[in-house]
Amino acid sequence: MGGMTSFNDTSSLLAFLKTRKSASAKAMGGEGPSQAELNEMLELATRVPDHGKLAPWRFVIFEGKARDAIGEKFRARWAELNPTHGEDSLKFQAGLFARAPMVVVVVSSAAPHAKIPVWEQQMSAAAVSFNLELAAQAMNFDVQWQTDWVAYDEGAKAAMGLKPDENVAGVIYIGKSTVPLEDRPRPEVAKLVTKWSA
């Protein structure tokens, strides 16, 4: 089964980071986090760089029947965008958030600021997304960070409760993998490094 061990010291933190890998939302089951666990995950998620202390992000939680309810809205919007698609395609879109017991949408509320570039605010939202993933994994859940079309379509974003000037930084699926987690090839770091010199 999937699942990551928690860490409580530097050596186990390094071991955790060396073996960390994402799960697949397509193969999630089990129970999601309790309210107390979710609260702790979200608190940990916000411990990220945040220039100007703007907190330019927020969370929308989908669990229980809310996953099916938003799924029906996704289905209707997909049918509107793709009128030639058949029932199988519509059914898949309706079940998009039902694949995991909990889905957390990390919303970037970055906005023009006199001192803080929008790009820095957006990167902070990305850091929140990954910190949420790490926190969930450290608490023995399996996680996948996605976006999918719902993150970019204005109708789907509105259905999820986003304002016109907000964007989806991450759709975080949280549950328990029903299959062993598989690693993917990692880049050769030496090829990515340049040592600058005058």
Image (cartoon, grey):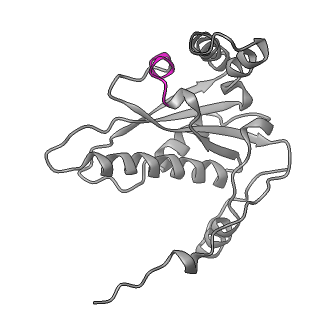
Q: Residue at x 64, y 17 (%)?
A: 71
Quadrant location of residue 104?
Answer: top right
Vertical placement of residue 51 versus 76, above or below:
below
In the rendered view, does 102 fall on the left or right side of 167? right
Q: Main secondary structure of the magenta part?
A: helix
Instruction: Name which residue lies at 59% across and 25% down.
Output: 62
Residue 104, placed above or below residue 136:
above
Rendered position, 66 above or below 44: above
Q: Is residue 28 magenta?
A: no
Please indicate whether residue 153 sits to the left or right of residue 91 in the image. left
Of all residues, the one furthest to the bottom in this rendering is 198
Q: Image point 71% across, 25% down: which residue? A: 98
Q: Quadrant of the C terminus?
A: bottom left
Tell me where residue 12 appears, x and y as whole percent. Answer: 66, 71
Frontmost residue, 11 versus 192: 192
At x 60% / y 17%, what residue is drawn? Answer: 74
Tally of numbered discs: 0
Closest to the observer, 159 or 148: 148
Q: Residue 33 in the image: state x and y as whole percent.
A: 66, 37
Q: Which residues are magenta?
A: 152-159
Q: Residue furthest left?
A: 114
* Nearer to us in this view, 148 or 33: 148
Residue 147 lies left or right of residue 124; in this view the side is right
Residue 11, given in percent of the width and then of the height, sits at: 64, 76
Q: Position of residue 28 (x, y in %)?
A: 77, 37
